[in-house]
Amino acid sequence: MNKSARVKQVTLSPEATVKVQARLSAKVMEHTSGCMLWNGAVDENGYGRFSFQGRNRKAHQIAYWLHTGKFLRKGLELDHTCNHRNCVNPAHLEPVTHAENIKRIYRRRSDSFYFDGNEASNTQHPLAA
Ligand SMILES: [Zn+2]
């Protein structure tokens, strides 16, 4: 009845899935923190980009799909629990509503602000050093 709430699910053959997995893995660097950092193209927001079925998708969404077999239903977003936008480790991705995602982003920002009192450190990527 509510068509907009439905998400088109993608089903690939096992062979095609393996190829997508290999293409994705080739662009990933494992970090000692457990993060799988995207080493390919990123967008202006710092999210990895990955070409999938003729579309330019977010790399972490494809990693999530490879892991769970599902794309997110409409209205949900993947929160990076590790706080690294270019991480594609499915274990570090949690589906949440947009409102929850925004709430978490502000909570993390204010945590680090009050933690060290240095606003500049909030903008620097923790793994950039
Ligand atoms: Zn991570």
Image: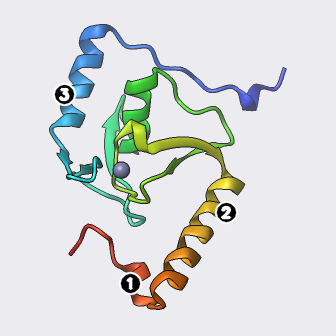
| Residue sticking out furthest to the right | 1
Q: Could you tell me which secondary element the residue under label 1 belongs to?
A: helix
Q: Position of residue 3 (x, y in %)?
A: 76, 25
Residue on which the image places disc 3: 22
Q: CA distance from mark 3 to mark 2?
A: 34 Å
Height in image: 24 above or below 83? above
Distance (Cα) linking label 1 and label 2: 20 Å
Q: CA distance from mark 3 to mark 1?
A: 35 Å
Percent of width and height locating residue 60: 39, 43
Q: Which circle, 3 or 1, is nearer the viewer?
A: 1
| Amino acid type of the residue that numbered disc 2 sits on in the rendered structure | Lys
Look at mark 1 in the image and give the residue it sits on: 121
Q: Nearer the viewer, residue 35 or 66?
A: 35
Q: Which mark is residue 103?
A: 2
Residue 105, picture quadrant: bottom right
- Proximity of marks 3 and 1: CB atoms separated by less than 8 Å: no
- Camera-nearest residue between 102 and 47: 102
Tag 3: amino acid: Ala
Q: Residue at x 37, y 63 (%)?
A: 46
How many marks are shown on the rendered structure? 3
As drawn, is 42 to the left or to the right of 101? left
Residue at 23 percent of width and 71 percent of height: 128
The answer to which of marks 3 and 1 sits earlier in the sequence is: 3
- What residue is shown at x 23% (from left), y 18% (from top)? 18
Element type where label 3 sits in the image: helix
* Helix, strand or loop at mark 2: helix
Identify the image quadrant of residue 61.
top left
Looking at the image, residue 126 sits to the left or right of residue 99; the answer is left
